[in-house]
Image: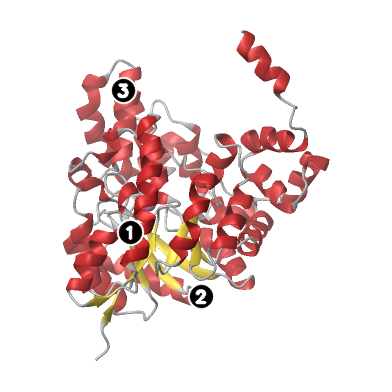
Amino acid sequence: MNPKRVRFMDTILRDAHQSLIATRMTTAQMEPILEVLDDCGFESLEVWGGATFDSCLRFLNEDPWERLRIIRKHVKKTKLQMLLRGQNLLGYKHYSDDVVEEFVRLSIKNGIDVIRVFDALNDLRNIETSMKSIKKYGGEAQCCICYTISDVHTDQYYVELVKKMEQMGADSIAIKDMAGILTPHNASKLTKAIKAVTKLPLEIHTHATSGISEMTYLKAVEAGADIIDTALSPFSGGTSQPATESLMIALEEMGYETGLNLQKINEAVAYFQNVKQEFVDNGLFNPKVMDIEPKTLIYQVPGGMLSNLLKQLKDAKKENLFKEVLEEIPRVRKEMGYPPLVTPMSQMVGTQAVMNVISGERYKMVPKEIKDYVGGLYGQAPAPLDSDIVKIVNGDNTIITARPADLLAPQLDQFRKELKDLAMSEEDVLSYGLFPAVALPFLKKKHDPFYDVVEQIVEVIL
Ligand code: CO
């Protein structure tokens, strides 16, 4: 009999440090250990995503493309994986199809093997162009479901999504539980339901925030999940993933073959303990990220969203209204057709709930993002929106039902024109297109190392 198998994707180079130290690990801190990581036996290493790209340009003065090439140079056997927000790529708005295709082409060209692609609303039209491009340029397309809980988000709902994803050419399926609300029981049920309709590998992604992640993985693996996302222990737990070594040991004892090499893993762990210590010493590692937040399970709201809301209310000197806001969130979410509370929907729903409570009149104040959402610009909501609220927010404006990107003219040439000779490569054009405000100073510095020296001196004098 074949031994039971489970594979691991390690997130230490992406989600783990994004979750615990605001994505501040540098390429220099990664490079010395990459070959050891390559020998650990992981199914893949997650190395890239929205925040890693942004953080490279904004805080680390690093070219994110160069980081990818360096990782690829050292990691020769293990697949490299990235997270892609469908038509939003790495940002929060839709890009035109030509930009999406070019970004996917260059990601694969620079070293990415597996692209995990999702849409915040699970509107599959928003991942169509990414999917086609991944297949066209020879990447592995991992279609990802944003997991959430609501009246409409039943196992059957997710199963239907998986069937459509398979038709779209998915090479594997992932369940992304960004909020850490997938319970062991539900993980088991959902895994079984999905495995009953597809032979595609199923990968589960959760966060340790609410204190149940190891149980969730155990039940998912027992139900047939093929891959789990974990992080080497120095950057595990809290808002990150559960620890790789611990799950490996527990599952191997139960007879699962993991393909992992504990000796190599321990070597990498010892290395990252020192890296972590640097972040503890410089204060970037805030111990609060390690708190267990069972409230996440009670309110079904991501932990990060709870703390953001509390901060918004404190800034407005209205923290006494926290409970009202918490009660308002499910109402807003229902009226908005139950969007999953993932970026950017979590911020949008949260802000609307705060405005409804603070202003004393519901939907008296409405942020532009919610207006766009109600107007159909983000895609189709999982359930119909409340028609009375739509009238208040949208008035007599038309509601778009087409694929949102169909309304966008090609943008790539415009980016090229705007950058002119500052672009030394097509990769530069994409960096600029995705993050213009941070990419521009970065590229200017790359061209002329002294370009902002005067500004810096002035800053020091002032
Ligand atoms: Co995550």
Residue 309 placed where, x, y %? 32, 30
The answer to the question of whether label 2 and label 3 lie on touching residues, with beta carbons closer than 8 A, is no
Residue 452 placed where, x, y %? 71, 24
Q: Does label 2 or label 3 sit earlier along the sequence?
A: 2
Q: Which residue is mark 3?
A: 313
Q: Is residue 314 placed above or below 153 in the rendered structure?
A: above
Q: Is residue 420 left or right of residue 87?
A: right
Q: Which residue is mark 2?
A: 169
Q: Name which residue type carries label 1.
A: Asn
User: Which quarter shows the C terminus?
Assistant: top right
Q: Is residue 19 left or right of residue 287?
A: right
Provide the secondary structure element on which disc 3 rests. helix
Kindly report the distance in space between the C-alpha atoms of the residues bearing marks 2 and 3: 45 Å
Q: Nearer the viewer, residue 98 or 454?
A: 454
Q: Name which residue type carries label 2.
A: Gly
**Residue 355 numbered mark, or none:** none
Front of the two marks 1 and 3: 1
User: Which quarter shows the N terminus?
Assistant: bottom left
Q: Nearer the viewer, residue 207 or 231?
A: 231
**Within-10-Å neighbours for mark 1: few <14, some 14–19, many 20+:** some
Q: Which residue is mark 1?
A: 266
Residue depicted at 68% across the width and 42% down the height = 432
